[in-house]
Amino acid sequence: MKDPTQPPAHLPNHLEAVDEEAVLERPQESHASRKASTSVPISAPTSTTASISNLQIPQAYNHAATTSNMSLNKKDKDNRADVYAHKTPISFSDDGTLRIFEDGTHEHALKPIKPEKIPNQSGILSGFLRKSTRDLNGEAAFSMLPEQNRMDFQRRLSIQSRKTSDSLDDESVEDLDSDCLTDSDDDFDTEAAIGDTQLALINKLVEAIDQGEDVVTKEKDKEGAQGRNYKLTEKYGKLLGIVGKGSYGTVKVVSRVDSATKKEVYYAVKELKRKDGETTSHFSTRLTSEFVIANSLKHVNIVRTLDLMHSSAGVYSEIMEYCAAGDLYNHILKFNRDGLHSLEADCLFKQIVRGIAYCHSRGVSHCDIKPENVMLTTCGVAKLTDFGTAAVFRTAWEREVHLSSGACGSEPYVAPEEFVQKQYDPRPVDVWAAGVLFLTMVTGTYLWPVAKMEEDLYKEYLAKRPVDGKAGCFEPIESLKSGEHYKSRKAVLYGMLDPDATKRLNIHQVLKSNWVHSIKVCEAAETGS
C-alpha cells in the first residue's frame, strides 16, 4: 500500500516542493494593481487578475452589455415554467430580476449579457486579416488532452447532453451540504481533487507545451484515425461573439445543437496568454495547473472547465460552461451602491459557501474569492470560476496541509495574515474573502481598500469588533437586522472576519450555522438548472 505521505515517483521537478508549499505553483505577489479610493466604491475594481468574469466595465454599469437576448434565455424560462406556474409574485426587486412569492420562496430572472459581434473583416485588408479571422473562429484549434482523456470526456459529454441541454454538472445537487458538513478543517479527505491521474495529466500537458508541440499539424495528420481529435467548431459549435476582454485575452461564446435533444448548448472559450516576461516553463506550469485543478472539480456551484485547446496561431484556450448572466460584480453595479435585496444576497452567499466548502473538502483553496470570480446563470445559480491562483493544500496521498506564502488575490478581499505572515493556511483566506464579499453584496461598496493596520477603515472595524464580552458596533454588520436569524448572521460575519486566522470560523462551521442553514435558496440553485 502506498505511503500517503510520499509523492509519486514521477512527480516532475517543477512540482517537487511538496514539503515547502502547495503542490501546484502559486504566484508570490498580489494580483491587485489598482488601489481603491478612500470612499471604497464598488465601481473601482482593484484587480486585473485574468478571469472569464472580467468583462471590463470599469466605471458605470454598461446597460448595453445586458440587453436581453431571448435566444440565450429561453431555455432557462422553459425549464422553470412548471415550478412557478401556480404562484403569483407578491414583491419584486427594484430592477425586476428578483420575484418573491407568498410562501417565502423566490426566483431570479437575470438578463443575459449580449455577445459583442466580431468585427467585419471585409475591405482592403481582408486578405491580410483572413488568417486571424480563422483563428478567432477557432476552426484550427484542437484539444491538448491525451486521447484517452478526450474519449472519456466525449463519452461523459454525450451522456450529459442526453440528460439536459442546460446543465453541464454531473455532480448530484441533492444534499448539497451533506458532503461538506464537518466540524473541523483538519479531517483527512480521501477524495482529494489532485491525485496520481491529475498529476500525470499535468506532466503530459507541460511536456507538450514546453516542447512546442504542434498539436494542429499532428492532429491533421491523423484525422482518419480512430479516436479523432475534433476541431473546436466541430466539437463545440459556431462562434456567436465576444463576452469578455482582458489582459489574458478574450472570452468568446460558442454554441452547437445537441443531436439527441435538438437543443442549443452554449460554451465559453477563454484565451490564456503568456504574461510579459513569463518563461515558457512558468507559463506551461501555470496554464496546466489552472486547467487541471478546475477540470477536477465537479459541483453545481463551480463553473465546469471542460477542455484545453491549442490553435494554429499558438493560442491556448479553456472551454468552459457558459453562464449567460455574467459575473456578480457587474450585477452589484446595477444597484448603484444600494446593495442587493437581502433574499438575493443570502441565496447567492449560501451557494458561494457551498462551492468553497466543496473545494476545501477536495483539498483546494480558491484564494481569489471576489464578485468578479462568481458567475451567474440567468436563473440565479452562482458558480465560482478562475482557479489561476488556487492552492492545492492537500493531495490524495497526503495528510498534512501545505501552507501558502505571499499575498494573493484582490486587495479588498485579501485576509490580513497574507500581509504579515511568511506562511499561512489558505483555507481561512477563502472564509475571510467570502465574509467581505457578502457585505459587499448588501452594501454595494468595499469595506476597506486593504486589510492593513495603516488603513483607517480597517482600523475602525478592528476597534468596533465584539471583544471580551463587549458587543460589536460595526455598522455594516450591525445594520443587518432582518430575518429570524439576524443574531446568528452577525455572529457568523464577525467570526468569518476574525483577524486571527486560528480563531476564524472554518467554511463548514459557516455552512452549519443557524443563519446559513436556514437560508432558502432558489429552486434553480437546488436543482442545478
Image (cartoon, rainbow, N blue to C red):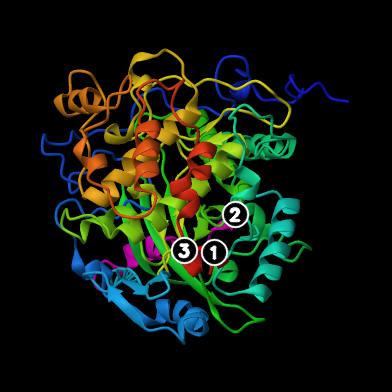
Magenta residues, start to end = 122-142
- What's the CA distance linking mark 1 and mark 3? 19 Å
Q: Amino acid at mark 1?
A: Glu
Q: Is residue 142 above or below residue 437?
A: below
Residue 143 vs residue 520: left or right? right
The residue positioned 46% from the left and 76% from the top of the image is: 76
Q: How many marks?
A: 3
Residue 383 pos. (x, y %): 46, 54
Residue 504 pos. (x, y %): 43, 27
Instruction: Tell me the element at label 2.
Output: loop
Contact? badges 1 and 2 (CB < 8 Å) = yes
Contact? badges 1 and 3 (CB < 8 Å) = no
Circle 1 is placed at which residue position? 526
Q: In the picture, residue 158 is in which quadrant?
A: bottom right
Is 311 in the magenta?
no
Q: Amino acid at mark 3?
A: Tyr
Circle 2 is placed at which residue position? 176
Instruction: Tell me the element at label 3.
Output: loop
Figure quadrant of the N terminus: top right
Choose the circle earlier in sequence order: 1 or 2: 2
Q: Residues within 10 Å of mark 3 (few under 14, many from 20)?
A: many
Comparing 417 with 112, the one in front is 417
Choose the circle earlier in sequence order: 2 or 3: 2
Residue 307 pos. (x, y %): 58, 54
Circle 3 is placed at which residue position? 322
Q: Amino acid at mark 2?
A: Leu
The residue positioned 18% from the left and 49% from the top of the image is: 43
Q: In the picture, residue 185 is in which quadrant?
A: top right
